[in-house]
Image (cartoon, rainbow, N blue to C red):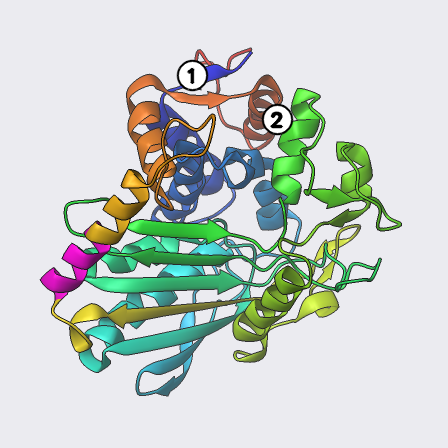
Amino acid sequence: MDAEVPPTELLALVTDVFLRCGMSAADASLLADTLVDADLSGIHSHGVLRVPEYIKKLTTGGVNPVGRPSLVRDVGACMVVDGGNSMGQIGMDFATKRVIERAALHGIAAAGIRGSNHSGAMAYYARQSVAHGMIGIATTNALPTMAPWGGAERILGINPLGVAIPAGEERPIVYDAAFSGSSHGKIRIYQQKGWPLPDGWALDREGRPTSDPAAALDGLLMPIGGFKGTALALIMGVLSSLLSGAAYGTELGDMQSGPRAGQDGHFVAAIRVEAFEDLARFQSRVDAAIHQIHDCRPAAGVERIYAPGELEFLRQAEYRALGIPLNEVTLADLRRAAQSIGCAVTAYAWLAG
């Protein structure tokens, strides 16, 4: 049975957890916000399920809780940021704000990030550009969990891509997904709930399709679109790792030992629409494209067709009003993790257990 958790209380608890890991108030708040934002969107694989993992990274895993990102290469609209071995969210937010500033001057700006760590959901960074009349792009490397097409070894990360496009009266178009049928985080959710995996999500260690979460976690993630998914994952790895000098593929680590601290790489970019087209006209045409999607004749059994990101915006409104549904395993893990770092949990009725 899921519990409906008030988002403000969840944010307060998780912020306190990261404060007790030695982070500054600003960094703890940012890191907590990225996780709660993912849960608000229904992307629980990147939500507070990650808190125990992040505590380990910040306390015994070699990540610097007070690491500071810095600009180490600056060539006009192109930058390289060193994350200072901070959590990836800190370096990604730093870089995103700077590419938005530069895109305001140059029309397009981009930054590669190195010296970083796990950075959460890409939509969090891509969406920041929308408020400035810009298209936002974000990608990151990931631990190898996929085989190249036709292989049966973990060589490729699923290396997700996030894109956000400003609309007018409609909500922005927001895409955030990896180039696999699913992610380890989602498979963990299915394992927690005792559910079989949908077709197309995973392979066992011999490269055979499986619906068993345990076999999937021991095996391989299945690419989307066959060889196309593995090619796109490789390209995202090049952008997020090779441009900045970060670790690529197996250099980052493996699923058994985990990632090497401070070796993750990311890439962010912003495109100022008015450098190309009148912003109002562009937004109006994006609205029209969304209306075409809404007006499309649905297939049998489908009630409504949604534009990319629309379901997540609707979930955010619902969950802010009614609470975020979190399963009992995630809550139990969160309770133990919070207590292990010295947080009082009795004030949170949904967590007291």
Residue sitting at the far right: 206
Residue depth check, mark 1 versus mark 2: number of the one nearer the observer = 1
Image: magenta residue range: 279-287
Q: Is residue 260 left or right of residue 130?
A: right
- Badge 1 amino acid: Glu
**Front residue of this view, candidates 83 and 313:** 313
The residue indicated by pointer 1 is 4
Residue 170, above or below 351: below
**Front residue of this view, candidates 251 and 179:** 179
- Badge 2 amino acid: Asp
Q: Is residue 275 left or right of residue 29?
A: left
**Front residue of this view, candidates 188 and 329:** 188
Proximity of marks 1 and 2: CB atoms separated by less than 8 Å: no
Query: Label 1: few (<14), some or many (≥20) within 10 Å?
Result: some
Residue at x 36% of width, y 39% of height:
306
**Mark 1–mark 2 distance (CA, rounded to whole Å):** 16 Å
